[in-house]
Image: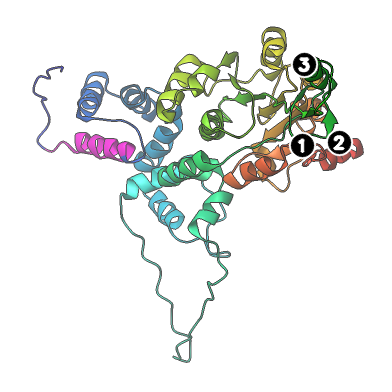
Amino acid sequence: MPEYAPLVLPENPRLAQNIIHFARALRKAGLPIGPGRVIDAVRAVEAAGFTEKRDFYWTLHACFVNRPEHRAVFAQVFRLYWRDPRYLEHMMSMMLPAIRGVQEERSAQAAEKRAAEALLDGIQPELPEPEPDKEGEETLIEVDASLTMSAEEKLKTLDFEQMSTEEVARAKRMLARLSLPVKPIPSRRKQAAVLGPRIDRARTLRAAMRQGGEMHSIARAEPRPRWPNLVVLCDISGSMSQYSRIILHFLHAVSNAKGQGWAKVHAFTFGTRLTNVTRHLKTRDVDAALKSAGAEAQDWEGGTRIGACLHAFNRDWSRRVMGQGAVVLLITDGLDRDDPGALAAEMERLHLSSRRLIWLNPLLRWSEFAPKARGIRAMLPHVDSFRAGHSIASLEELAEVISRPDDVGEKARLMAAIREG
């Protein structure tokens, strides 16, 4: 354990106290911060000093943040804690039940609700008392909540990016119970069956030869089921990081579940480069599995090079993992700035190598979504199904339609929009 010399603080160390309270809020929001880091932060501010808020921000950032997924939480807690007391009103409103016509027009940003919960730290906002009408008569309002959704049903439809710390933990537990079953692929190979629909001529003749040429029974057979591989390509760039982490929890459950039908589950992450994380998802403990996967994938929350990463997959991994009629899940928002022609060529090659190519895009959560980005326009014609992937409900819908070859999701509607545009 490191030994710390006594800290020389002023008589009224308000800044040090504020840093301590700020560290408590970060710990409440999910960052692993102990007393040692708090002391290091106070010492760092004392040694470096600051004349601008930006210097103060990066000094505390260097002391408290050591994982890419903690950056967004730190940024939101810092903004809410150090910037403007008026944000307390917004935090309180986020903790109140949302009532149409009363709630704020601006929706919470990524990790903002989690930061609000951490700063409030158990404070329960009080609902405003209803004001009496002008005549002094009391107005009784009855609300029939018999048809309202349960907490679990509300969580299913909640966007992953807007979940609080507690909601993320509950969502991960729900995803661990979610299955992704698949139907077998028809095969020409046969297996013995007492009541099979076909006559097994070879087995029947071999049995007759053992009996001196006399045929006492007719052997029957049925088609041997053949199970496909599941190949997952998951975008872990900055715009997809929150979705990718929760979806990787779901893929861990699929990889370790028995009886779902998949021959093998192969998982790859990509941002600026392609990383194979299949072996990490085989670890039974989900936290250990994702920690090791995150350590190997060095491009978390970085840029996006979809075309280059798909080229690396098609060149190095396609022949290894795409056999047996693999089903491919492509999880990305499609926001790519590389050459759209090269991206379209790699998507076409991926599509031809797979039995089905399903694209999950969290941007489909918006009802006004339109395929305006060049990357989306280049990728969309080469997928079999285009679906949303932003909530537990969207993943449940995926489990229902993954074995339906006629399901195209939103592809037909968006392709029509591209042709009209």
Q: Amino acid at mark 3?
A: Glu
Determine if the magenta segment contains residue 58. Answer: no
Contact check, label 1 and label 3, Cβ < 8 Å: no
Q: Which residue is mark 1?
A: 195
**Residue in front for this viewpoint, 168 or 338:** 168
Q: Earlier in the sequence, mark 3 or mark 2?
A: 3
Please name the residue shown 57% across and 15% down the image: 276
Callout 1 amino acid: Leu
- Report, in whole angstroms, how far the alpha carbon at label 2 lies from the one at label 1: 52 Å
Where residue 93 sits in the image (x, y, percent)?
Answer: 45, 57
Give residue 273's quadrant in the image.
top right
Q: In the picture shown, does residue 9 fall above or below 314?
A: below
**Amino acid type of disc 2?**
Ile
Secondary-structure class at tag 3:
helix
Task: Name above or below for residue 401 compared with residue 356.
Answer: below
In the image, is 108 to the left or to the right of 383?
A: left
Q: Earlier in the sequence, mark 2 or mark 1?
A: 1
Q: Quadrant of the C terminus?
A: top right
Q: Closer to the observer: label 1 or label 3?
A: 1
Q: How many marks?
A: 3
Which segment did they paint magenta?
12-27
Q: Say the numbered circle drawn on residue 418.
A: 2
